[in-house]
Amino acid sequence: VRIEGLAARLAAIVGPAHVLEDPDVRAGYELDWTRRWRGTALLVVRPASTAQVAATLDACAAAGVTVVAQGGNTGLVGGSVPRGDAPAVVLSLGRLVQLGPVDTTAAQVAAGAGVTLAALQAHVEGSGLRFAVDLSARQSATVGGMAATNAGGIHVMRHGSMRSQVVGLEAVLASGETVSRMTGLVKDNTGYDVCGLLCGSEGTLGVITALCLRLIPERAFRLAVMVGLPGTSAALDVLAHARRLESLEAAEIMFAEGIALVGEMTGVRPPFAAGYGCVLLLEFAADEDVTDAVAAVLEHAGCPDDRLAVARAPAERARLWELRERLTEVVNVVGVPHKLDVTLPLRAIPAFADGVAELVRSVAPDARAYVWGHIGDGNLHVNVIGPDPDDDRVDAAVLQDVSARGGSISAEHGIGVAKARWLGLTRSAADIAAMYAVKRALDPSGMLNPGVLFAGGAP
Ligand code: FAD
Ligand code: MLT
Ligand code: ZN
């Protein structure tokens, strides 16, 4: 490691104001959103162009330091902050904020990696199109970070996750070379899909600098439905009926404990009396009014009239969604959460959801589990409060249970450092060896995000 003079070399590339060495200024880049993961950065560097990113990576490679790419630092698996003892530079992409014109013919837009989801949404608004991925970290999460984690969010069941929106991508590899496919060609079968590979690579294969993103038509009519139900099986029954409507765009589940916590801490509650085991939140989007069709489906599904709320106006829909969106924040206030983002086959969801709190308590008797998720995708977020940040016995128990039920240990947040040691629960030895071969080929010295995905180096 040859770090003497690195700050000066980086300052010559990005300007002295964008090399952050002061510990107080660095602090926000060194601690993750959950406060479970932290490290110390040698320095934080904030390039403003792809060329500056490439020169930064060259300088870091020459100095023998590792690099952690960071967008909005909203990641929930510890991948966006430094870790361990190796001297790491945090490469913040927050200044790559250029946005191209909305191409309404191709239904695409080009965006710098540091553009936040909210900025992208605002840019596209009024064009008749919209961006298909939405999640509640929209004010801070960047499109680069969302692509790097292959983020999901609330509309995956209809429109797919982040990878499905990426038509083109530009990235700088560990070698300092730039790969670029920003032509916006929807059909381009010319070999390996490098863009697809970088989606979900969590900063381990390259630094994404720009994206060409698919847009979808904005629908004129939206309807949100909240229904209180006895439990998960009933929620799956309603989902089975609701799925018959093509307009179904979101299907979210929350449970009584989490709903009570949001109520206590924010005053936001369901617009009907308690007494439910879970609450299902559905959203429908179409070009025409689908109220009657939705009402018929809900009636057929046997939804209780006294625990049902329907909202059409944006403000009314937002009130229903607020209950769902504030879960993450209130749980984070109560403690440092162990966030276990899992998917299961839908048929396995009721037994898992009914048993997970007890499973958690069998390992950590004083722990509390708050569960919610994107039920339409079989994706539940198990949030455990109580165990120390570095006590991962609860994580092990829940992830092993998920694996035994045929599920995946990460649905949408990624592996990061939080789940690296359990990657083998979901991926075979051959899978992991293939992934590692790609890692070795693109980043032979292991400069990019060490410790993420692969715990302890080579499998
Ligand atoms: P960061 O947190 O900065 O980074 C995440 C990972 O990507 C790290 O490994 C980092 O090294 C890497 N990375 C970041 N930028 C780049 C880049 N340009 N090139 C290469 N690697 C990069 N996730 C979901 O999937 N669905 C949700 O519904 C959802 N909701 C959330 C709600 C809240 C309130 C919060 C705090 C988080 C939520 N997340 C969700 C998690 C998070 O993954 C997303 O917010 C988002 O994908 C992260 O974007 P970011 O810019 O903050 O990335
Ligand atoms: C969510 O769906 O709420 C997000 O993925 C964030 C979280 O799990 O807390
Ligand atoms: Zn989620």
Image (cartoon, rainbow, N blue to C red):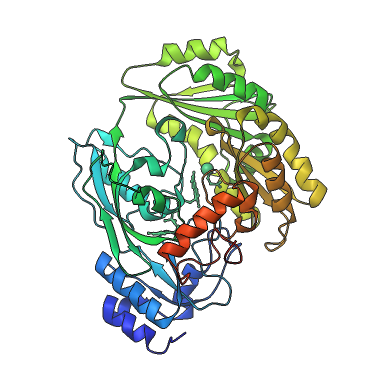
Q: Is residue 182 above or below residue 237?
A: below
The quadrant in which residue 165 appears is top left
Query: Residue 208 at what x, y percent from top left?
Result: 35, 58
Q: Nearer the viewer, residue 24 or 205?
A: 205
Residue visible at 73% across and 40% down in the picture: 356
In the figure, 53 relative to 342: above or below?
below
Q: Say which of 312 and 76 sits in front.
A: 76
Q: Is residue 212 visible?
A: yes
The answer to whether residue 96 is visible is no
Which quadrant, please, contains the C terminus?
bottom right
Q: Residue 362, image x and y in percent?
A: 82, 47
Q: Nearer the viewer, residue 100 or 212?
A: 212
- In the depicted structure, whether residue 30 falls above or below residue 262: below
Q: How many marks?
A: 0
Residue 306: image location, x then y, percent? 61, 17
Q: Quadrant of residue 22?
A: bottom left
Residue 237 lies left or right of residue 297; in this view the side is: right
Q: Is residue 25 above or below residue 418?
A: below
Residue at (47, 84) in percent of width and height? 1
The residue at the far bottom in this view is 4
- Residue 55 x %, y %: 29, 74
Relative to 146, 343 lies left or right: right
Q: Residue at x 55, y 43 (%)?
A: 411
Q: Is residue 209 left or right of residue 343?
A: left
